[in-house]
Image (cartoon, rainbow, N blue to C red):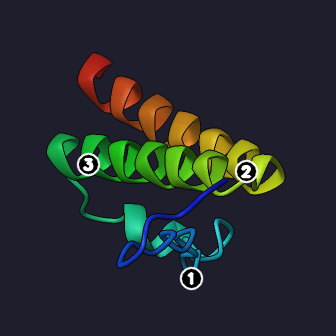
Amino acid sequence: MKVKKGKSIPEPVNYDFPDPASDDDDELFGCDAFTLLHKAAEYERWAERARCCGRDDLAILYEIKAEEWFEWYKGMEQG
């Protein structure tokens, strides 16, 4: 790849990924439906970032956590 004079090749983005197993059951205590759905979306975003960085192994863990939070959300909405 030729780089024109004055141009630089952008560095790949490296994130400090949070541990997907860091959530406690204590976090669920007092959560409303919005918070549960927000946490699910947050983990989906981390999964997407991990995939973009080539961390498919970590992306799978984030997707599992997103699904768990979404299941808790659905449970709250049903009853």
- Whichever of labels 1 and 3 marks the residue nearer the N terminus, that label is 1
Say what amino acid the circle numbered 2 marks.
Leu
**Viewer-side residue, 24 vs 7:** 7
**Viewer-side residue, 79 vs 61:** 61
Q: Depth-wise, is mark 2 or mark 1 nearer the camera? A: 1
Look at mark 3 in the image and give the residue it sits on. Answer: 38
Please provide percent x and percent y for residue 77: 25, 23
- Residues at badges 2 and 1 in contact (C-beta under 8 Å)? no
The furthest residue to the right = 57
Q: What element carries label 3?
A: helix
Up-down relation of residue 54 to residue 79 (above or below): below
**Viewer-side residue, 5 vs 13:** 5
Q: What element carries label 1?
A: loop
Look at mark 1 in the image and give the residue it sits on. Answer: 16
Say what amino acid the circle numbered 3 marks.
His
Say what amino acid the circle numbered 1 marks.
Asp
Q: Is mark 2 on a helix, strand or loop?
A: helix
